[in-house]
Image (spheres, rainbow, N blue to C red):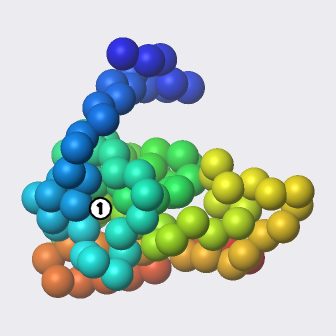
Amino acid sequence: MQQGDRHEVATVDHPDMASVKTQHGVPDDLRSCHTMIADGYVIEGHVPAADVERLLAERPDWVEGLAVAGMPLGSPGMEAGGKVQPYQVIAFGNGRREVFASYP
């Protein structure tokens, strides 16, 4: 168990991450390298912590999770000498998708 900024975090290495993503309803085209379950929501990829906090505060009833597809430069954990790629955080659930946040 690790202590994050505001939350306790348990790290689990799973031998079949594709099945974890499928089990939690992550659409194929939104899959990335990391998957986290936060208070019942699935967080996929390099989603900024502020967006996770916003999701947990607002709790939209249709949202199952947030995703950042791929590994865009400039997203959390992907900082590379000031290089930045624009990306979007996508909220998904119940067959619906919506841009939750955009980063230039």
Residue plotted at (42% across, 64% down): 32
Horizontal placement of 5 versus 78: left or right?
left
Residue plotted at (43% across, 57% down): 33
The quarter holding residue 102 reads bottom right
Question: Quick one: label 1, few (<14), some, or many (20+) residues within 10 Å?
Answer: many
The quarter holding residue 45 reads bottom left
Residue 2: tell me if it is visible.
yes
Horizontal placement of 5 versus 82: left or right?
left
User: At which x and y percent is residue 83?
Assistant: 84, 67
Please state, as top left, top right, bottom left or bottom right, where the N terminus lies in the image: top left
- Compared to residue 12, the image places residue 49 above or below, namely below
- Where does label 1 land, which residue? 65
User: At which x and y percent is residue 7?
Assistant: 42, 25
Residue plotted at (37% across, 75% down): 30
Residue 91: tell me if it is visible.
no
Q: Label 1's element?
A: strand
Please state, as top left, top right, bottom left or bottom right, where the C terminus lies in the image: bottom right
Q: Amino acid at mark 1?
A: Gly
- Compared to residue 61, the image places residue 9 above or below, namely above
User: At which x and y percent is residue 101?
Assistant: 54, 71
- Compared to residue 94, the image places residue 80 above or below, namely above
